[in-house]
Every structure is written in structure tokens, then in C-alpha cells.
């Protein structure tokens, strides 16, 4: 099935309003394209996360618009009629938001097998003197004498294509000798561990799952060692990593489930802090103070929970005085399925982790 890409040209001011109007007529999936100034601001604010950005290409001829993709069939044709009627109605409004030209620009887009087309760009790759990193759908070249390391490019970091991974692989290739002990931290796909094993490293494995608070010594690191690791070696490893925070032993088969809380959880906690701060700002508290108050509240609450050993429900009840402000907020969170949303987030993260590990 082919598609029709439809862009509604507007202003920066009109983007969210157009999205709202599209949602009203049943078109719920759309893309907002911001203007060059807003895009430049985003690039500036996220500069620390980018190795390279071709800003000229990203910003070139960038006009604010809302873009949708409609199927090239009767359903898409009906949606196009509704979209056109909605835009015509908006053009007749003279007062209010500046919505710009509201010009509708459409073009046909061929349907392609995006799930598999990218594979054509990944071929066997020689690294160092002895390794050949090969995706599963390719056969390694014959007669090279290299060790084949099967690794599929995917959504987990560490497929051999990035320069830093190649550098580490080359170093392993040069220095790993049979029986040598190798520590691979933050392994992502595990490509360095696999390479070390193929090159003859000792098959003693300690799997860990740290989290981002480890950077300030307040992290949680899940630890699982195979039966080749001695008690003395495991103790030495834990001593070496002690400054990162709490280290806790866990069976290998539970690490994926636990990391959905310990590894992914900081993102949920940051979202909660941000939401609390947004609420405080709405009530008039300065942003910097609101953020600090929310973060300190979360830190203190976690400390109280851990130090007292009380059930979180009991600690919650201790804050909720009859007919008071807190119980009203709790009631609203319950109405909005706060618990269920958090639980579902953990389950979704766990399922994705299992999928990536296949």
C-alpha cells in the first residue's frame, strides 16, 4: 500500500492548534515540523548529546507545518476530505491565532519494507587482525582466517559499527591472551565480551546492571556471576565497584525484570520530579526552586522508606490527613490510573528488554 504525505503549512503559533483540530476529526497520528529558529534552539539545548549535526541540512528551508500520512485508499480519501474541510473552515476565521497560509501540500510516497531495507547497508567488517564482525543474514568472506563474531545491528548499543567500539575491539584483538580475565562494563549488546571470549579470555562472567545515579555514588548495581567466578574474585569486584552505590546479588534470570525498575526507573523518577515542578510553577513557585523542592522531596521520601522499613502505603497514609489537601491529590492520581500507568511502564520496559536480548 502506498501513502499520501500531506503537509498543512502554518506558523509556529498554529502548530499545536492544528494538531488539536486534526485529533478532533479522527486523525490522531501526525508530525509537527517547527521553524528553523525553534529547531536551532533544540539543537543548542541538546548539543552535549550530539557527536555531529549537519545543521545546514537540518535547518534548510524549514517552514512550520503539521504533516500526516494518509493511506492511498478509500479510508485515506475520506480522511483527506475531512482534513480539507477542516482547513477551509479555519481559513474563514479572521480573528484569533495567526495560522499562516494553511496551504495544503501533498505528495505520494511509495510503500517500502523499512523493517528490512536497512540491512543492505551492513556487511561483514574486519576489525583488528583477527576479528570479522558479521550480521546474521550475511556469510563471512572465505579464506580470511579471521574469527567470525556474529552480531546484528539493532537498538542495543555495541554492534561494531561505531568508532569507539571498533577501537575497543582492536585493542582486545591485540592484547587478549588465552586465559586472561577481562571486565566489560556497560556492555550493551555484549559485543566486547563475546569478542574477548572468542579470542580466548577466561569464561568467568559477572553480569551487572548499573543505573545513572551511580555517577554520584548513589546508584544500584545488580550483580550476577556464573559458577566459574570464585567468592574471592566476586568480593574483589564488589570492592572495586563499591563507590558506585549499592551492589545487590540477583539470579541471572531476574536481572532483566529488576532492571526495568532499577535501570529504567530513574527516567520515570525524573518525569515525576519534572511534573511536580511544573505543578508548582503553575501555582507561582519559581522554576529553580520548584525543581529543587521536588527532587529533595523524592530523595527524603526514599530515605525515610529505606531507613524505617515501613510499607509505602503506611507512609502515604501518614501524610494524608482526613479531608486535607494531600488526600485530594491522591484521589486524583487514583482516578487518572497513576499506579496502573507506572506498573504498565515497568512491564513494557521488561518486555522490550527481553525482545532486545533475543
Image: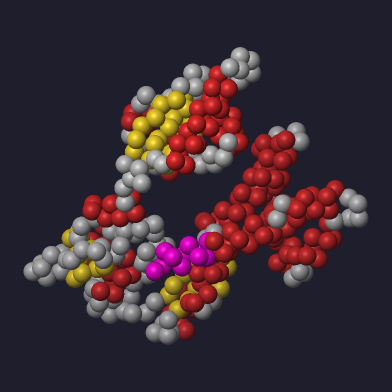
Along the viewing direction, whichever of 250 and 6 lies nearer the viewer: 6
Outermost residue, right direction? Answer: 322
Q: Nearer the viewer, residue 79 or 53?
A: 79
Residue at 30 percent across and 62 percent down: it is: 152
- Residue 314, image quadrant: bottom right
Main SS type for the magenta part? helix
Instruction: From this view, report whether residue 54 is shown above or below residue 247.
Output: above
Which residue sits furthest top? 94
Q: Position of residue 126 (x, y in %)?
A: 18, 60
- 293 lies left or right of 162: right
Residue 26's place in the image compared with 209, above or below, is: above
The answer to if 325 sits in the magenta stretch is no
Percent position of residue 164, x then y: 30, 54
Q: Is residue 219 visible?
A: no
Q: Measuring 29% from the left and 65% from the top, which residue is drawn there?
A: 151
Could you tell whether 22 is left or right of 170 in the image? Answer: right
Residue 54, percent across and down?
33, 34
Tell me where the magenta segment starts and ends, as one range.
349-358
Amino acid at each position: 500500500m502506498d501513502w499520501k504525505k500531506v503537509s498543512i503549512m502554518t506558523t509556529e503559533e498554529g502548530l499545536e492548534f492544528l494538531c488539536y483540530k486534526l485529533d478532533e476529526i479522527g486523525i490522531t497520528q501526525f508530525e509537527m515540523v517547527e521553524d528553523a529558529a525553534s529547531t536551532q534552539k533544540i539543537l543548542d539545548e541538546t548539543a552535549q548529546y550530539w557527536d555531529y549535526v549537519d545543521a545546514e541540512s537540518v535547518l534548510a528551508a524549514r517552514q512550520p507545518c503539521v504533516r500526516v500520512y494518509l493511506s492511498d485508499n478509500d479510508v485515506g480519501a475520506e480522511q483527506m476530505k475531512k482534513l480539507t474541510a477542516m482547513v477551509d473552515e479555519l481559513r474563514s476565521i479572521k480573528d484569533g491565532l495567526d495560522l499562516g497560509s494553511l496551504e495544503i501540500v501533498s505528495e505520494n510516497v511509495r510503500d517500502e519494507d523499512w523493517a528490512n531495507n536497512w540491512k543492505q547497508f551492513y556487511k561483514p567488517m574486519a576489525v583488528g587482525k583477527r576479528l570479522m564482525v558479521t550480521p546474521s543474514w550475511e556469510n563471512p568472506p572465505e579464506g580470511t582466517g579471521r574469527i567470525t563474531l556474529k552480531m546484528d545491528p539493532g537498538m542495543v548499543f555495541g554492534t561494531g559499527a561505531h568508532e569507539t567500539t571498533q577501537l575497543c575491539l582492536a585493542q582486545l584483538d591485540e592484547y587478549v591472551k588465552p586465559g586472561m580475565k577481562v571486565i566489560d562494563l556497560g556492555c550493551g549488546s555484549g559485543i566486547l565480551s563475546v569478542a574477548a571470549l572468542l579470542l580466548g579470555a577466561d569464561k568467568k562472567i559477572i553480569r551487572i546492571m548499573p543505573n545513572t545515579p551511580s555517577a554520584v555514588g548513589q546508584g544500584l548495581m545488580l550483580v550476577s556471576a556464573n559458577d566459574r567466578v570464585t567468592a574471592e574474585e566476586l568480593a574483589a569486584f564488589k570492592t572495586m565497584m563499591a563507590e558506585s552505590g549499592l551492589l545487590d546479588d540477583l539470579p541471572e534470570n531476574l536481572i532483566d525484570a529488576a532492571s526495568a525498575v532499577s535501570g529504567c526507573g530513574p527516567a520515570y523518577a525524573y518525569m515525576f520530579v519534572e511534573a511536580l515542578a511544573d505543578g508548582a510553577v503553575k501555582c507561582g513557585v519559581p522554576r529553580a526552586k520548584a525543581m529543587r523542592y521536588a527532587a529533595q522531596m523524592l530523595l527524603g521520601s526514599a530515605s525515610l522508606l529505606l531507613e524505617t522499613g515501613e510499607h509505602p502505603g503506611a507512609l502515604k497514609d501518614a501524610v494524608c490527613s482526613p479531608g486535607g489537601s494531600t488526600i485530594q491529590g491522591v484521589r486524583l492520581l487514583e482516578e487518572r490510573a497513576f499506579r496502573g500507568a507506572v506498573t504498565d511502564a515497568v512491564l513494557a520496559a521488561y518486555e522490550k528488554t527481553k525482545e532486545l536480548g533475543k
